[in-house]
Image: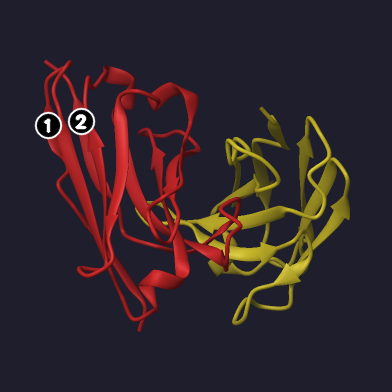
Amino acid sequence: EEKLVESGGGLVQPGGSLRLSCVGTGFTFTSYWMSWVRQAPGKGLEWVANIKQDGRAKFYVDSVKGRFTISRDNTEKSVHLQMDSLRADDTAVYFCVRNKLTGDRGRSHFASWGPGTLVSVST
Amino acid sequence: DIRMTQSPSTLSASVGDRVTITCRASQVVNPWLAWYQQKPGKAPKLLISQASILETGVPSRFSGSGSGTEFTLTIDSLQPDDFATYFCQQYSSYPLNFGGGTKVDMK
């Protein structure tokens, strides 16, 4: 059974940092781009970032560029999101997701989702 | 950036109704359009890929259509399990934007 499990969420003050992690099992981790998608409380979905199978290509939504860094460790079947200079509007549930498409195309929809981890940025 | 606009934002319906949700893109995204279903407190579930391809295990009462910039999700004969929020998503270009969502609730 395919599974994605996030960890690392919590309460952090504005300007602080947090590192989210996600472990993927039940599928060939190295075959897929991986992404993070977030959802602010009561709001819609927002794609945040993605990373290629070998980690050499990464893309970000403009609102997090220069503050967030996505990385992956294929030996551990994990993907991470380092979040720095956090702001109140970063408050959201962060989902780790697996791209539906394989291959070089990073622009994809999302076949598998973790349950999410809540990040709250507040004083 | 491609902006995705869903309508309506809320839809009240009864079991057995036919429901149609519209998603409009600010640029052509064909055929890179997906639909998801989300229930409260849960992660979204992929229903439809490439505008009209039903995912394995998704009931056949769900269907997707459209091309270019206008797409629809139709639920034939709404079932109790279908009360949820539905999102469209374009994957034609970065950023991979979602529509604002359509909540289907009980009339």
| Residue B62 seen in the figure | no
| Foreground residue among A117 and A76 | A76
Q: Chain of mark 1?
A: A
Q: In the displayed structure, would residue A66 be above or below residue B77?
A: above
Q: Would residue A82 be found to the left or right of residue B60 on screen?
A: left
Residue under the image location 37 percent in, 72 percent down:
A29
- The answer to which of marks 2 and 1 sits earlier in the sequence is 1
Q: In the rendering, what colour is chain A?
A: red
| Foreground residue among B14 and A114 | A114
Where residue A120 is drawn, which disc sits there? 2
Q: Are marks 2 and 1 in contact (CB under 8 Å)?
A: yes
Q: Secondary structure at mark 1?
A: strand
In percent of width and height, residue A51 lies at: 42, 50
Image quadrant where residue B51 sits: bottom right
Q: Secondary structure at mark 2?
A: strand
Residue under the image location 27 percent in, 18 percent down:
A88
Pointer 1: residues within 10 angstroms few (<14), some, or many (20+)?
some
At label 2, the amino acid type is Ser
In percent of width and height, residue A70 lies at: 32, 43
Pointer 2: residues within 10 angstroms few (<14), some, or many (20+)?
many
Q: In the rendering, what colour is chain B?
A: yellow
In percent of width and height, residue A2 lies at: 36, 78
At label 1, the amino acid type is Leu
Where residue A11 is drawn, which disc sits there? 1
